[in-house]
Image (spheres, helix red, strand yellow):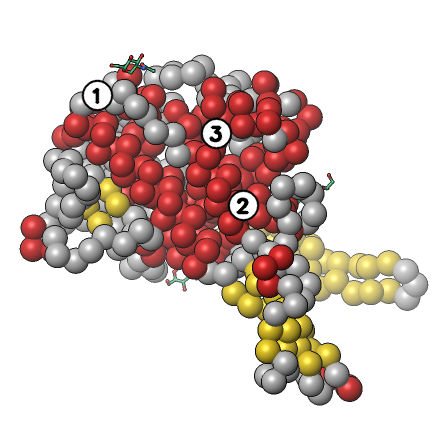
Amino acid sequence: AEPWGAPALPSACRGCLEPAVRRLTRPVRRWLGVAPFGAPEKLGCAALPLSGRQQELCRRKPHLLPSIGEGARLGIQECRSQFRHERWNCLLAAAAAPAPVPAPGAGPLFGYELSSGTKETAFIYAVMAAGLVHSVTRSCSAGNMTECSCDTTLQNGGSASEGWHWGGCSDDVQYGMWFSRKFLDFPIRNTTGKESKVLLAMNLHNNEAGRQAVAKLMSVDCRCHGVSGSCAVKTCWKTMSSFEKIGRLLKDKYENSIQISDKIQRKMRRRDKDQRRIPIRKDDLLYVNKSPNYCVEDKKLGIPGTRGRECNRTSQGAGGCNLLCCGRGYNTHVVRHVERCECKFIWCCYVRCRRCESMTDVHTCK
Ligand SMILES: *[C@@H]1O[C@H](CO)[C@@H](O)[C@H](O)[C@H]1NC(C)=O
Ligand SMILES: *[C@@H]1O[C@H](CO)[C@@H](O)[C@H](O)[C@H]1NC(C)=O
Ligand SMILES: *[C@@H]1O[C@H](CO)[C@@H](O)[C@H](O)[C@H]1NC(C)=O
């Protein structure tokens, strides 16, 4: 199939902004709105755009406020970084713009990607849920909490015969995962309509897939002791991977995400009948609707299109002009850079540089 063409709108998205669907995207939608606040702890829970239950959780655990803000920032930043060369580049309308805070349930701000049930929706939910696990767990390990700390189950363990023991502070993701579930996985009791039931099940599944990615990428670090680095004894601890690595795993899950049937049965099923026997794993990303191609602007859905995006003329990949510009071609501008160069240190004490100019071609989509 041609990679571009008429923008396909997922048919099941007709009801995207139905009240029920809006209610069901509220937890993450509100929380995404926290990201633009630089220091949420200074404002307090009440000032933040959180939903009722999130407010309550925030008030009960006010010391977690910095982690809540940091988790949102981490998730959004990683989403942008993973998708920076793609047609859909994770520019979430309201998250991109700083305050004013979007009014609750306001139009298509945060509308499309959060409620369309596409692969992009799946990625956002997963990366945001993972961001919260990561930031809360960090805070636990830093000793900033009373209800969680380092993983104490590992203390005094290890293997003397192999010459190592657990020591230091092992990250304990269990509390972070618990908090992320509490904060984001709201059961919607009175959901009506098949469509919102499927979307809800999908969102909850993808939240959990994000958390599983953090747990799966836990690794072990060790430090050697012993006479002049002989490594006779090692101290080891468990540590979370960098969030960038977690983002890469989730991006990979996104590329291999599974379309599920929009007919909800007792449990979710693959849409592809031939593959129904292959079980769905809890770390798979799931989606219901096909994505549009994100090529052309659609103000109503909040899709900016790729016109004006910078592209790479020589790349055949996602960021290449061919794919990114959807076959419309590109403009070339010459950009002049001026920088300090050939700097020399002059004794003593200053640095003398020359001014160097260079020209580079910048290509942007038509
Ligand atoms: C722990 O708390 C201190 C002081 O409030 C803060 O500066 C630091 O950033 C916190 N660390 C984490 C990982 O939350
Ligand atoms: C949910 O539905 C039940 C019964 O249909 C009703 O009693 C209850 O008030 C509803 N709850 C909400 C939050 O709408
Ligand atoms: C453009 O793509 C080529 C091939 O993938 C790569 O080697 C090069 O570094 C890219 N240029 C920029 C500016 O990203």
Please give the count of numbered marks on the rendered protein. Answer: 3
Q: Judge whether 142 appears above or below 23 on screen.
A: below
Residue 352 in view of the camera: yes
The front one of 364 and 324 is: 324
Dot 3 corresponds to which residue?
31
Q: Which residue is mark 1?
A: 192
Asked whether the beta carbons under mark 3 and mark 2 sit within 8 Å of each other, the answer is no
Nearer the observer, 88 or 269: 269
Local secondary structure at mark 3: helix
Q: Nearer the viewer, residue 229 or 308?
A: 229
> As drawn, is 236 to the left or to the right of 342?
left
Q: Which residue corresponds to the image point at 31% horizontal and 51% vertical from the top-left?
A: 282
- The image quadrant where one finds the C terminus is top left
Cα gap from disc 2 to disc 1, whole angstroms: 32 Å
CB within 8 Å, label 2 to label 1: no
Image quarter of residue 235: bottom right
| Residue to which mark 2 is pinned | 175
Q: Is disc 2 placed on a helix, strand or loop?
A: helix
Ligand 1 contact, mark 3 (Cβ < 8 Å): no
Report the amino acid beneath label 1: Thr
For residue 136, the mark is none
- Image coordinates of residue 317 in percent, x first then y, are 31, 57
Residue 299 coordinates in the image, percent (x, y): 30, 23
Q: Residues within 10 Å of mark 3 (few under 14, many from 20)?
A: many
- Tag 2: Cα neighbours inside 10 Å, few (<14), some, or many (≥20)? some
Inspect the image, locate mark 2, and give the three-letter code of the amino acid beneath it. Tyr
Query: Considering only order in the chain, which callout, 2 or 3, is on the residue closer to the N terminus?
Result: 3
Compared to residue 187, the image places residue 142 above or below, namely: below
Viewer-side label of 3, 2: 2
Alpha-carbon distance for marks 1 and 3? Answer: 24 Å
